[in-house]
Image (tube, rainbow, N blue to C red):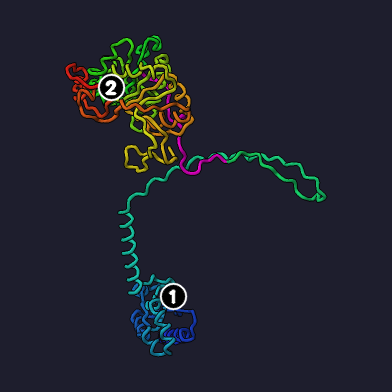
Amino acid sequence: MTRDASAANNIRGCAMNTVLSSAQVAVTGGIARRRYCTVAVVQRDLAPSEHSSSLSAAPKHARCRQTSRAAVDATHVPARLHFTQMSLLPSTRERHASVSPPTAEMLARRAPHDQRCVVGAGGERAPSMLGPVRRSHCAALAALAALLLLLLARLPPAPPRPRPAPLRPPPAPARSTPAPAPAATNRTAAPAVVSTAPASTAPRGPRPQLVRELYVAGHARPHAELCPALGARLRLLVLVSSAPAHAAARDAVRLTWGHYAARADVALAFVLGAPPPALRAALDAEDALYGDVIEGRSVDSYSNLTLKTLSMLEWADTYCPRAPRLLKTDDDMFINIPRLLQFAADPKRANATRTIWGKVMRRSLPKRTMKSKYYVSPLQFPARVFPDFATGPAYLLTADCVRPLLQAAPAERYVRLEDVFVTGVLAARLGLKRTHAPEFYNKRVAAHPCAVQRGLAIHMVRYHEQFDLWRKLLDGKTKCAS
């Protein structure tokens, strides 16, 4: 019993010494947070009740937790030693009361780490429980992680990364040839180097497009039979600019003033650009029926009217070069063919060369408003005033104008207004004469029989109006002053 009492006294003394030494370490600012005490207990001689009473005799403020008391009580093996490890820590409140205010504040900050102690058996530390502060921190972190996962789940998937462009090999270094050193007394000077590399040709900003970059030569439907003997027996070749969808306008022309194509000295054909796939079948059927549709290789659009006009000139130069006169017109025009033949045969014009007749516009200004149908960008035409040109609805050319215009076009800037480009820019560069003829109305006029009979070309004529003008042209009852 004496040995048991001494063991219990050792436990109490160890607990008290641990409390005092812990408080001293905290006051002196040491870094040690726990002090452990190992007590050898002889299980054979010390009863479980005495062992419990000896442990409970420790101060309450030590707040030790015996996590393996049941294991100690249950294991009663003779002559075997068990080691019990206790972590005795003073409470935070008692520390604050026994130390100075600065030390109490420091201990209060360390309190969450020292609020639990562990008593284990066999020299092993039992896992400690997290304090209230740590549990609140873990709960906040878990909630934040769940919120982040929810936000990441609702984000749209990232777009696929574009493939990097293939690397081009670096340009070869420019060769340089050293120039001969000048005769001077200073022989240490380095010889001058003159670079023979060409100047950089990289475009700076947008650049104008040339006609050669856009025009595609050739015809998908040439119909060379429309001009027999290359036009040797013709007096007039009429080429009508039309769109693939304007089948009704072409029918109106064929049924009215296009009847004059039955004459041996007049040839007429419709010139189109490449049609869209939806109109291919209808255009094939129309051409199989009439055989007067010439199809170029450029896409048919309003901005490509210049390309379509160049296709006309190419066809005339290739299949009908011997026709003395060429009339370029549109499918919404009414043409007085008998009057036009008289106009061309007039002695003042019969022997004319390198001449264009029509409604000539002088000192016209380009439209710089992009909303305008006749907009021309400064890249296409940088000058402030157009050269004199014959308006596009209808103009008449001599045969010797066709090939020079066709040859001069590829080197020029492309201008989307075909009349300005062909009869203005190209004609001015070639020195062709542009003669104004008031008979080319090239506008909508009152449908009076005399106005129809005097004029050569009337513009903006709809389908049904073609038949009305045709009837008034053939009216033999109306007497008109000369």
Q: Is residue 203 magenta?
A: yes
Q: Position of residue 316 (x, y in %)?
A: 40, 18
* Of the pair 418 and 260, the residue shown nearer to us: 260
Residue type at mark 2: give it: Ile
Residue extending farthest to the left is 477
* Figure check: 211 above or below 379: above
Q: Position of residue 191 (x, y in %)?
A: 75, 46
SS at badge 1: strand
Callout 1 environment at 10 Å: few (<14), some (14 to 19), or many (20+)? some
Q: Which mark is residue 335?
A: 2
Q: Tell me if I can see residue 74 in this picture.
A: no
* Of the pair 359 and 99, the residue shown nearer to us: 359
How far is mark 2 from mark 1, CA to CA?
Answer: 124 Å
Q: Position of residue 13 (x, y in %)?
A: 43, 87
Residue at 18 percent across and 19 percent down: it is 478
Q: Quadrant of residue 400?
A: top left
Q: Magenta span covers which residues?
A: 200-221
Give the residue pinned by disc 1.
Answer: 83
Of the 4 image quadrants, the one containing the N terminus is bottom left
Q: Is residue 215 magenta?
A: yes
Residue at 27 percent across and 24 percent down: it is 455
SS at badge 2: strand
